[in-house]
Image: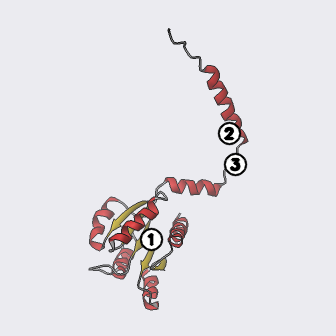
Amino acid sequence: MAKKKINASDLIKKIEKLTRERMASGEVVELQNFRDLKNKIEHKTLLVIEDDETMRLAMKRIFEVDGFVVKLAADGTELSGILDDTTPDLIIMDVGLPWLNGFELAQMLKEHKDLKKIPLIFVSGKTSDEDIKRAFEIGADDYIKKPFEIEKLKKTVATLLKLQT
């Protein structure tokens, strides 16, 4: 038995009509919601500089779930390859890094003409008042003590990225 040819024009017309009706009755999207969605679509890039591999990979998973592109470095020596390929939108860095500590590395980043305006968050187990003061003197935008609350870190990152735009 030969298959009957389907006439889909009526179906297409019904779909188009219903779509137009629903679009016309839909809510107007607020500008801030549009900007938030646009920022998620743009895939902001975070650079995580952390010598502890477990912590580095955990941060990668934490932020990739939210749509971020996450670049990882264990120390300052791994930065050249990353910075040759991309400019991060935000940097998260530990203080206790090998070879160059986080303060020394941050100082170099903040003195570089193309990197100095990138927001910087220290996430560290070093919690003395002197360490925190030094971080802000170098130009850090925030200092979060380990162990940290994931939501607090996410909120800080989101706030700094919003302020940057």
Residue that appears at 50% across and 70% down: 150
Image-quadrant location for residue 68: bottom left
Residue denoted by label 3:
28
Q: Separation of disc 1 and disc 3 at Cα? A: 35 Å
Residue 13 x, y percent position in the rendering: 65, 25
Give yes or no for contact between labels 3 and 2 (Cβ–Cβ under 8 Å).
no
| Mark 2 or mark 1: whose residue is earlier in sequence | 2
Residue denoted by label 2:
23
Mark number displayed over residue 143: none
Q: Nearer the viewer, residue 33 or 153?
A: 153
Q: Secondary structure at mark 2?
A: helix
Residue 112 relative to residue 35: left or right: left
| Mark 3 or mark 2: whose residue is earlier in sequence | 2
Residue 120 x, y percent position in the rendering: 44, 73
Tell me if residue 67 can be seen.
Answer: yes
Tell me: residue 92, above or below residue 15: below
